[in-house]
Amino acid sequence: MLAAAFIVCATTLTITNAATIMSTSSNYKPPITGTKLDAYTSHPKRHLVIVTKQGTIKLQLFEKMAPNHVANIINLAKTHFYDSTYFHRVIPGFMIQGGDPNTKDNDYSNDGQGNNGSNRINAEFNAIHHERGILSMARTNDPNSASCQFFICVADAGYLDQKYTAFGQVIDGIDVVDKIVNLPNVSGQPGGTNPGRAAEVYKMYVEGE
């Protein structure tokens, strides 16, 4: 299950990086810039936009590094798959995780278990370092099981490198990510904080194509 696979990762990070101090939102700069960015994307003006209850997050996608993951999330966004979902798992000092269609039903007990049907994406592990602002794909214990759930790192998570497929970065709205990761738990379920509708995604779409 997608949620179960992340429990191990979250626990490890919480123990080892408890003293991590995140940079302030005003000091944030996207991790990948300049000529390095040219090697990662063919569409620098194309952005994935996530409009949430807390504000708007804008992401640059790295189709040169993970073409199948980028194509998948673009297709899902264009078909309104993510609209009315919410970030169901947030862990300060680690990440915010969303994209589960099960969150549309307001039943907290099945959050983290949803997928987009029979479609699965093979791993596209790459050289991108998991750090603050990086977009990556959730999966089960099977490396080739990515479907629709994704996460955005709020701090360094380098131990995920070469184990999860990173495929984008936040270029605007890191303050929104910080707001979401600090929302209170409303579910009473184990496995990280679930902020419910406070972290709702009103819509996701692609701009600049």
Image (spheres, grey):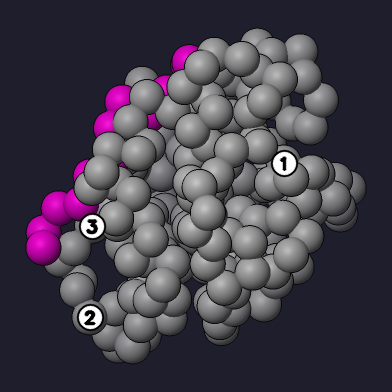
Residue 42 in the figure: left or right of residue 151: left
Residue closer to the observer: 34 or 197: 197
Q: Is residue 129 above or below residue 105?
A: below
The magenta span reads 197-209
- Residue drawn at x 44%, y 67% is 69
Name the amino acid, label 3: His
Left or right of 175, for residue 194: right
Q: Name the kind of residue labelled 1 in the image.
A: Ala
Q: Nearer the viewer, residue 168 or 110?
A: 110
Residue drawn at point x = 41 percent, y = 72 percent:
68
| Mark 1 surroundings: few (<14), some (14-19) or many (≥20) residues within 10 A | many
Mark nearer the viewer, 2 or 1? 1
CA–CA distance between discs 2 and 1? 32 Å
Which residue in the protein does label 2 denote?
42
Q: Residue 126's spot in the image, x, y percent?
A: 56, 82
Q: Residue at 47% across / 27% down in the picture?
A: 86
Q: Earlier in the sequence, mark 2 or mark 1?
A: 1
Coordinates of residue 159 in the picture (x, y in percent): 75, 68
Q: Which mark is residue 47?
A: 3
Closer to the N terminus: mark 1 or mark 3? 1
